[in-house]
Amino acid sequence: MSGTLTADAKNAPRRHHSVSTPIDRLIMRVAERLGGSKAKELERFIKFAFVGLLGFVIDSGTVIILQNSLLPPVTAANEPLDANVALATTVAFVLAVCSNFVWNRLWTYPDSRSRSARKQLTQFVIVSVIGWSLRTLWIDIAYQGLGELSTTFIQMLQADYAPALLDQNKLGTMLALFFGVIVVTAWNFLANRYWTYNDVD
């Protein structure tokens, strides 16, 4: 057999690396039932949301682990910038972005292959860094206030609740992270869908 490709082999569609999961059929059925003519787009959004949920677990789990071990938040009141909070949330964000890129490329958008993985990763990282910047700024501004607010709310329900400032700041960080993730998820989906993966039908 010669080393040249036949015309059929040259014209054959390229195989895409993809993964399948036990929930693929369920997602497809839900998308077909609710999406109508936009079923494929709804299927992608649902998969993107699942990937984002996994990313959130990685993200928040990493923050919890780091804040309870290597990078606890500062305990001084009214500290203008807490490097430990910024570093913990950044490490967590990077791990989540890595997971999200791999899962989105292989599961959510396996048909997006007009660009190389390197170019898509670059675009994905640019989108993610913009989201990270907004999220980190928000968390750094809001975590102490949200910690105080949540402590006040809990004390309305349980008067003897008096957390240490460290615990209050941890709670505030998690609340700020939660709200930040909602906004960044919307940004990431739209920016990646219409830029990083804009070659899918």
Image: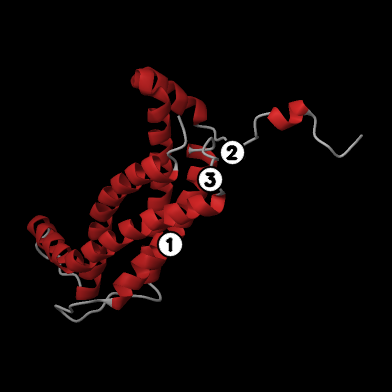
The quadrant of the image that shows the C terminus is top left
Q: Which sits in the foreground, 183 or 121?
A: 121
Q: Which sits in the foreground, 125 or 86?
A: 125
Q: Where in the figure is residue 55, as x and y percent of width and height?
A: 41, 51
Mark 2 — residue? 18
Q: Amino acid at mark 2?
A: Ser
Question: Tag 2 or tag 1, which sits nearer the N-term?
Answer: 2
Tag count: 3
Mark 1 — residue? 94
Figure quadrant of residue 50: top left
Q: Measure how far apart labels 1 and 3 are at the Cα level.
A: 22 Å
Q: Residue at x 52, y 49 (%)?
A: 102
Q: Residue at x 49, y 50 (%)?
A: 120
Mark 3 — residue? 115
Q: Mark 2 Cα within 10 Å, few/some/many (few <14, many 20+)?
A: some
Relative vertical location of residue 37 with respect to residue 110 in this rendering, above or below: above
Question: Tag 3 or tag 2, which sits nearer the N-term?
Answer: 2
